[in-house]
Image: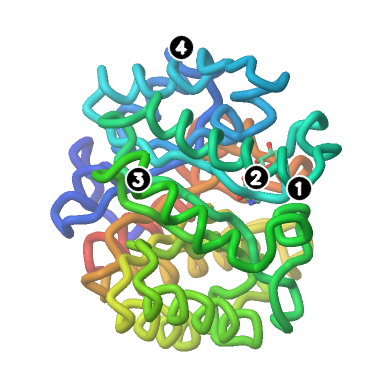
Amino acid sequence: MPPGPFGPSDTLKAAASMRGKLIGTAVQTSLLGGAPYGTVLTREFNYLTAEYEMKWNVVEPGRGSMNFGPGDAIVGYAASNGMQVKGHTLIWHGAVPSWLDGLPAGDLRTEFERHIRDVMAHYRGRVHAWDVVNEAVADNGAGLRDTLFRQRLGDQYIADAFRLARAADAQALLFYNDYGGEGLSAKADRIHALLQDLLSKGVPLDGVGLQMHISATSRPSTASIADNVRRLAALGLIVHISEMDVRINNAFGTDQERLEAQRSAYRDVVGVCVMEPRCDAVTFWGFTDAHTWLTGDRPLLFDAQYQPKPAFYGVLDALSGR
Ligand code: XIL
């Protein structure tokens, strides 16, 4: 049971605002507006990320043919509901359109520059922060992921992307976003070193997103996440928890125990952000188990009937300092 008492004013948005944090979720254009999805979305959240509508294969399905409609719908919805938007994502090895894949290096360079310039220009003034580069570090932390951008543009594609991004939109906050480096680990060390190196070269970088796709029973310790968040903040970066969800289907115990473990995970991680002044946003990768990329699991704050789960109260507790 929730520790309560909880009233109608106990929304995530109200509690997060008291802490000076944005509270966000990934959304899908096709779900916006209607009840119950829109009802819960506008009641609880003030920060939206497109789950896929701003990825390269959606915004430019054919070379030079732009498709901003789905992303525009999210930006318009956010504006009419007093929400901010995080752009996701400009340079990523996923969601690469097939036409881009086959280009020789010179053409790829041209398209890389044009993509950052055109997409950021389109959303200038309406998108508060961008994930400029996503998931550029290799899973074992040994070095950079060997993406088509690295292969054809060289390691400096990361620095180049941030410089192009700043030139395209001087106002937007520029983020590096990744997974698997939430707690201290070889990969987290590599991400830290990469960002430190970029900053030392004067590359315009404002923040780092820790995706936080975790599992209730195998997750980095809270202390380890806190240490990592602190050392990233110490670089002068803003830190976001950027794509949080918590799998429970592989957890032990009864259903109630699984939901309880999930609640603790949410409370602990959001609690780390609450404790760190430079952590100014937490975004979940969806909010209802009815719509999650982790099909078959129940990783989010509301169940498939849009009722708050223990996880929801875990987040509310963390934001309220309980
Ligand atoms: C995922 C979406 O949730 C899926 O719908 C899509 O099929 C693949 O991408 N890291 C990221 C996100 O940065 O963009 C990914 O989103 C999840 C992992």
Quarter of the figure with residue 20:
bottom left
CB within 8 Å, label 1 to label 2: yes
Q: CA distance from mark 3 to mark 4?
A: 38 Å
Q: Between marks 1 and 2, how big is the CA–CA gap? A: 6 Å
Q: Secondary structure at mark 4?
A: loop
Q: Is mark 3 within 8 Å of ligand 1?
A: no
User: Which of the 4 image quarters holds residue 86?
Assistant: top left
Identify the secondary structure beneath mark 3. Answer: helix
Left or right, 82 with reference to 188: left
Counting residues from the start of the chain, the first of labels 3 and 2 encountered is 2
Foreground pick, 77 / 205: 205
- Residue, disc 3: 167
Residue at horizontal 76 percent and vertical 58 percent from the top:
147
* Image mark for residue 105: 1
| Rendering coords of residue 93 (x, y %) | 72, 50
User: Would residue 85 be found to the left or right of residue 31 on screen?
Assistant: left
Residue 109, disc: 2
Q: CA distance from mark 1 to mark 3?
A: 22 Å
Give the position of the N terminus as an image quadrant. Answer: bottom left
